[in-house]
Image: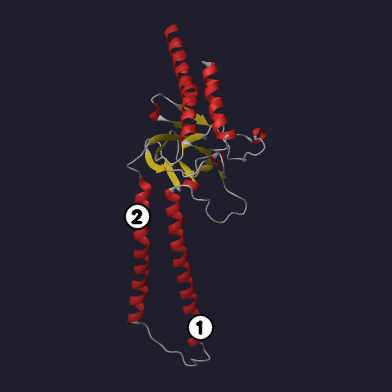
Amino acid sequence: MLKKRLTALAAFFTTTVIGGSIAMAQAPEEWQMGFQDAHSPTMEKIVSFNDVLLWICIVMSVGIVGLMAYILVRFSRKRNPVPQKFSHNSVVEVLWTVIPVIILVIIAIPSFRLLYFMDRTTEAEMTIKAIGHQWYWSYEYPDLGEDVSFDAFMIPDDEIEEGQIRLLETDESVVVPIDTNIRLLVTADDVLHAWTIPSFGIKIDAVPGRINEGWFRVDAEGVYYGQCSELCGRDHAFMPIRVKAVSKEAYAEWVAYAKEEFASNDSDEDLTVARLASAD
């Protein structure tokens, strides 16, 4: 059994690390002001929609500043020593009502399309369940046919190795294949949490007693980082998320390892509990 586990782990390590399939790491950078690189269809649409909003904001800002400059010059004291007195202007009142409505409609159409696209996928090829705890994440892979589950804890500062990212590394990674529609189920067992990966454009609240659904599809191999994005208590800042996207061949190697490493551990624990109960 131990030899089988080591063989599966060695094969996965050779494929994903030595083989060079982990080609990038997507994490926050110092002085970063924009989005992280998009690596899912959802995030690509979010970035495109943000570009549209940015140009709308620029046009509105230029228009408002230009209007204010015209008013300051046209109606200055020098040009109008005797101020005019009036209380209503029907044209102006109609314009400042209709123009914002038109802008909101222009924004709403692509916004609703994006929200619908982000909601869920009807063509999911696999499912992962994420459960938030104070303060770590646990994961289940129900499609693997066994009770494959594990906990992922943040690596503390005194155990961080060279090349690892402080406050973002975990002892276990969520391993997923690229070019695969992945359904994500999210819940919590204590308080509100939120499962977030910026590069995937996904942020789902983890609510006790409720299962929320989302999805993502990773387009490139690499390591992607996220964090809990809901104020969940004292160690809110110390429950990161680490997703390792690999080729489908490497994922198959990991599945073989996971079935031995994670599912068998749970089985062994259940067997031990059963033995203790029968002994009592």
Q: Which mark is residue 205?
A: none
Of residues 10 and 86, the one drawn nearer to the viewer in this rendering: 10
**Percent coordinates x, y for residue 257 in the rendering:** 50, 25
**Residue depicted at 33% across the width and 72% down the height:** 98
Callout 2 secondary element: helix
Residue 149 in the image: above or below residue 21: above
Q: Which mark is residue 72?
A: 1
Q: Name the residue under label 2.
A: 113
Residue 54 visible? The answer is yes
Q: How crowded is mark 1: few (under 14 residues within 10 Å), some or many (20 or more)?
A: few
Quadrant placement of the C terminus: top left
Q: Is residue 167 left or right of residue 130?
A: right
Q: Residues within 10 Å of mark 2 (few under 14, many from 20)?
A: few
Q: Is residue 2 left or right of residue 276?
A: right
Q: Which of marks 1 and 2 is in front?
A: 2
**Residue depicted at 45% across the width and 10% down the height:** 275
Callout 1 secondary element: helix
